[in-house]
Image (cartoon, helix red, strand yellow):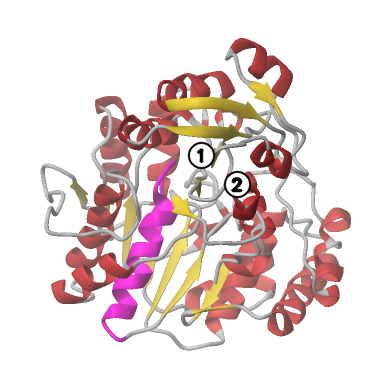
């Protein structure tokens, strides 16, 4: 499914509009276009501070957030590149700790797209924005650079980084089958493709078929592999600020990556993990226009769970705190598997479409799962006429819409 963005800043939007003319308009894999584009930009990816490179199906964004927080707790700065954004494109590029401002973003995108157009490269949205991020990072000093893989790993645009300081693999699951193969083993092979010779590859515990494939890739690449349970353990002393039992493992992965590189002290790791902020991960919304639609005493939580593996992690939280679910799932996701996992902890199910994206058939889902349909988030929330605990789930894009409507922009 094609990536895209909108901006309230006219200069930024003018550049985002150019993607429709320059790019293929869909997700594509391969390093050729990114390599060519970066070469014409002076290969900024070779002038970055030490890079922490993180792949995975679920939890890689949280792992990156933990890494950044730990680096900052040590009194250092970090560039961060993540995707997708929730509300504003700027969220993808954090320069030395701060989100890129529109005044810097517009000329940066223009520079990259001008080069792409001049050389008839035709990069995808993600390839061009990856190049823009690396260009921005190369021009500002920082102590570290945290880079989240977009799709896959082996052929992901971020995999042009020749020598990261460490690579990490978060939780794997079956997702994006059209690009990465139908089985967990295929997924593992692609995700582990970020491994580099002589660079530690720190791996969260996975199903045996996935671990076997990751080990094979690590051996071929000459990357020393450190796996959970064998080479490092979940650190029970960590106290993640992010909600959900699964975040302890994500935090432990980040800690293991930092420890193997001796990049920061344990004191910084514990402090950073306890202070990490990462939106749309079991995030309780603050008072705002969206929460005001619920009756007094209600709570409204958003989470970006968008595949069966993520739904399983969320189901554990629902087992102790059942909630009314407002569900919006993209058309290319396993909607019924996601709902089946979450339904036991649901007090009710309301299905809506994800704004501006092709969505799963809400009428069919409501019929199969004995739910109801609402035209949008506002209508879904207004239908609760008594105190209610509500969770919005199914897509990071839907979570972003909730944050936008509640005027709670990620910073």
Q: Which residue is mark 2?
A: 294
> In what element is the residue under mark 1?
loop
Percent x, y for residue 96? 47, 82
| Residue in the picture at 61% in, 11% down | 368
Classified by dominant secondary structure, the portion drawn in magenta counts as helix
Q: Is residue 168 magenta?
A: no
Whether residue 45 is visible here, answered yes or no, is yes
In front here: 208 or 320? 320
Which residues are the magenta region? Answer: 53-75
Q: Establish if 271 lies above or below 75.
A: above
Dot 2: within a 10 Å radius of its alpha carbon, few (fewer than 14), some, or many (20 or more) residues? many
> In what element is the residue under mark 2?
loop
In front here: 364 or 161? 364
Whether tag 2 and tag 1 are in contact, CB under 8 A, the answer is: yes
Residue 58 location, quadrant: top left
| Residue in the picture at 64% in, 70% down | 90
Q: Earlier in the sequence, mark 2 or mark 1?
A: 2
Dot 1: within a 10 Å radius of its alpha carbon, few (fewer than 14), some, or many (20 or more) residues? some
Q: Establish if 147 lies above or below 339.
A: below
Q: Which mark is residue 154?
A: none
| Residue in the picture at 54% in, 72% down | 411
Quadrant containing the N terminus in the rendered view:
top right
Percent x, y for residue 238? 18, 59
Percent x, y for residue 391? 51, 40
Q: Is residue 84 left or right of residue 221?
A: right
Percent x, y for residue 72? 34, 79
Residue 314 location, quadrant: top left
Q: Which residue is mark 1?
A: 388
* Real-space CA distance between mark 2 and mark 1, rounded to the nearest whole angstrom: 7 Å
């Amino acid at each position: 499914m094609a990536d895209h963005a909108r901006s309230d800043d006219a200069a930024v939007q003018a550049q985002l509009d150019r993607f429709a003319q320059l790019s293929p308009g869909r997700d594509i894999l391969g390093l050729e276009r990114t390599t060519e584009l970066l070469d014409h930009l002076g290969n900024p990816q070779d002038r970055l501070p030490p890079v922490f490179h993180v792949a995975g199906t679920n939890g890689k964004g949280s792992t990156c957030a933990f890494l950044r927080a730990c680096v900052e707790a040590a009194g250092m700065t970090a560039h961060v590149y993540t995707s997708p954004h929730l509300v504003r494109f700027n969220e993808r590029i954090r320069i030395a700790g701060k989100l890129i401002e529109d005044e810097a973003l517009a000329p940066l995108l223009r520079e990259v797209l001008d080069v792409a157009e001049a050389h008839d490269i035709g990069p995808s949205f993600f390839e061009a924005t990856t190049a823009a991020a690396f260009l921005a990072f190369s021009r500002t000093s920082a102590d570290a650079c945290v880079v989240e893989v977009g799709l896959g790993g082996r052929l992901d645009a971020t995999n042009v980084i020749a020598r990261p300081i460490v690579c990490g693999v978060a939780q794997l699951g079956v997702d994006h089958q059209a690009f990465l193969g139908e089985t967990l083993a295929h997924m593992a092979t692609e995700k582990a493709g970020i491994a580099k010779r002589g660079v530690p590859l720190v791996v969260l515990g996975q199903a045996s078929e996935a671990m076997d494939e990751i080990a094979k890739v690590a051996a071929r690449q000459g990357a020393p592999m450190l796996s959970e349970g064998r080479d490092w353990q979940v650190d029970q002393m960590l106290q993640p600020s992010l909600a959900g039992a699964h975040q302890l493992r994500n935090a432990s992965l980040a800690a293991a990556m930092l420890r193997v590189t001796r990049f920061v002290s344990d004191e910084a790791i514990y402090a950073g993990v306890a202070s990490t902020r990462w939106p749309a991960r079991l995030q309780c919304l603050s008072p705002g226009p969206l929460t005001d639609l619920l009756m007094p005493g209600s709570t409204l939580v958003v989470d970006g769970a968008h595949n069966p593996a993520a739904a399983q992690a969320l189901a554990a939280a629902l087992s102790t705190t059942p909630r009314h679910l407002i569900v919006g799932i993209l058309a290319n996701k396993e909607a019924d598997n996601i709902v089946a996992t979450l339904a036991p902890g649901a007090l009710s199910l309301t299905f809506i479409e994800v704004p501006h994206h092709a969505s799963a058939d809400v009428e069919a889902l409501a019929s199969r799962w004995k739910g109801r349909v609402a035209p949008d988030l506002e209508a879904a929330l207004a239908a609760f006429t008594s105190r209610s605990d509500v969770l919005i789930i199914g897509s990071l894009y839907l979570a972003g819409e909730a944050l936008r409507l509640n005027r709670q922009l990620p910073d």
